[in-house]
Image: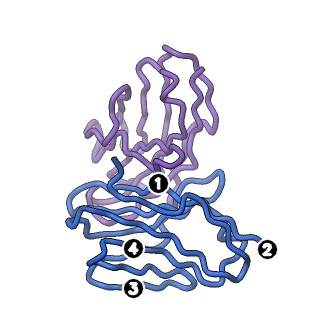
Amino acid sequence: QQQVKQSPQSLIVQKGGISIINCAYENTAFDYFPWYQQFPGKGPALLIAIRPDVSEKKEGRFTISFNKSAKQFSLHIMDSQPGDSATYFCAARVAGNMLTFGGGTRLMVKP
Amino acid sequence: DVKVTQSSRYLVKRTGEKVFLECVQDMDHENMFWYRQDPGLGLRLIYFSYDVKMKEKGDIPEGYSVSREKKERFSLILESASTNQTSMYLCASSPGSPRSNQPQHFGDGTRLSIL
């Protein structure tokens, strides 16, 4: 039983488009929501993270939107580039506990 | 830059064998983790260690054990490998408390096939 449900499993976007990956959770005790990016043949690396006291966090072309009432958060990649092609994992943590990861989204950005 | 090194990129073993996966980190991090990565299931925590000789079970510890005799090295052991343990195994490390928001730094993974 996955506590963090991620969708879609795979996504194809044209260069310059917006990539959107969604995650939903049930446990209202989660208080930290990171996103990890994994390139083929490499381990995941922290991309961006948010806490539930803010509704949005932006770092360059990457934005996390957080909807506490809907228990959803999403990653938006603006002006998507072929170099963004990777697998993206959302995650969540209850304070004092370990990270719970979503199932992953494989993003392909076509030139 | 933090470096987490996993000893093998690919490994093929037979059912019933005892398998060792090795991981070394060079940043003097207190915590080390072993995950397995399967399509659609994301990363699932097998075991973690917050100090030398200290360990805790993660979400899926059955069939695995771990060893941390030195701070920089964390080993995952499959006591008697089975085909359902065919997977990508990822090692990670982080500083401070294992339950803090410090980012985890991952190795590049070991793809293990059990025949």
Q: Residues within 10 Å of mark 4 (few under 14, many from 20)?
A: many
Q: CA distance from mark 4 to mark 1?
A: 14 Å
Tell me which amino acid carries mark 3: Glu
Tell me which amino acid carries mark 1: Gly
Name chain A's colour: blue
Q: Residue at x 49, y 27 (%)?
A: B84
Q: Earlier in the sequence, mark 3 or mark 2?
A: 3
Q: Earlier in the sequence, mark 1 or mark 2?
A: 1
Residue assigned mark 1: A103
Q: Residue at x 35, y 69 (%)?
A: A33
Does dot 4 land on a helix, a strand or a loop? strand
**Front disc: 3 or 4:** 4
Q: Are marks 3 and 4 in contact (CB under 8 Å)?
A: no
Q: Residue at x 36, y 32 (%)?
A: B66
Using the image, tell me which numbered label, if any, was put on residue A56: 3
Name chain B's colour: purple
Using the image, tell me which numbered label, if any, was put on residue A111: 2
Does dot 1 land on a helix, a strand or a loop? loop
Q: Earlier in the sequence, mark 3 or mark 1?
A: 3
The residue furthest top is B16
Residue A60, percent from left and from top: 55, 85
Q: Residues within 10 Å of mark 2 (few under 14, many from 20)?
A: few
Tell me which amino acid carries mark 2: Pro
Q: Chain of mark 4?
A: A
Residue A25, percent from left and from top: 32, 63
Q: Is residue B27 above or below residue A52?
A: above
